[in-house]
Amino acid sequence: MGDDKISIIPYDEALRITYDAKIVSLRWDLVPWSLVLDIDYKSAFEQTNSEIGRAWLVFYDITELWFSFDEARLPNGLFSTYYISTSKIDAEYTDYSLSILAPTFDATNKISLDPHKTLKIRAKKLRSAKSIIVGAFGEFGPTFTQRQALGNDQEFLCVFEK
């Protein structure tokens, strides 16, 4: 189950897959002692009208999670703007940093501060998987039902259990 729809991806691809991706959720309930970053990724990096797939980035043994959304409004979700960067902390842990857009607005609804923020995760390991199936879903991306068709939670979990 899941092998025909979901595939584990190499570490370097996992770092790149976040380019211009929509972060759909941060989940604690799927993999014990881990954080799952559930994203809609673009199938062709750095292309505006690329088809969209679903991916999971699983961070194991997290010791820190940091982000600032102070007064940010996120009407269409949270979007990353670049690849994940890494910084080795010691023999066990790595800091993973992801540039995101989290805009704040003034009283006239104009962006008031720099909308670029950083999401940081300190973890021992990163493993990732993506849907093999991709599709065109319009301006706001896939609906919940369409995302499940790309790969549901059970299908993703299956490939991580191997």
Image: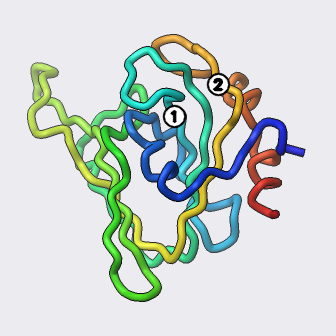
Q: Nearer the viewer, residue 12 or 22?
A: 12
Residue 17 located left or right of residue 106 = right
Q: Is residue 27 at least partly visible in the picture?
A: no
Q: Amino acid at mark 2?
A: Val
Image location (x, y in percent) of residue 41? 51, 34
| Residue receiving disc 2 | 134
Q: Is residue 45 above or below residue 66?
A: above
Quarter of the image with the C terminus in it: bottom right
Label 2: element kind: loop
Q: Quadrant of residue 64?
A: bottom left
**Direction bottom: furthest residue:** 91
| Residue receiving disc 1 | 41
Q: CA distance from mark 2 to mark 1?
A: 9 Å
Q: Amino acid at mark 1?
A: Tyr
Q: Is residue 52 above or below residue 66?
A: above
Label 1: element kind: strand
Query: Badge 1: few (under 14), some or many (20 or more) residues near its Cα, within 10 Å?
Result: many
Q: Upstream in the sequence, badge 2 or badge 1?
A: 1
**Residue displayed at 78% across by 36% down:** 5
Q: Is residue 88 at least partly visible in the picture?
A: yes
Image location (x, y in percent) of residue 33? 63, 73
Q: Nearer the viewer, residue 59 or 13?
A: 13
**Residue displayed at 60% across by 30% down:** 53
Q: Nearer the viewer, residue 22 or 1?
A: 1
Quarter of the image with the N terminus in it: top right
Residue 148 located left or right of residue 46 = right
**Residue displayed at 28% across by 38% down:** 101
Image location (x, y in percent) of residue 93? 43, 80
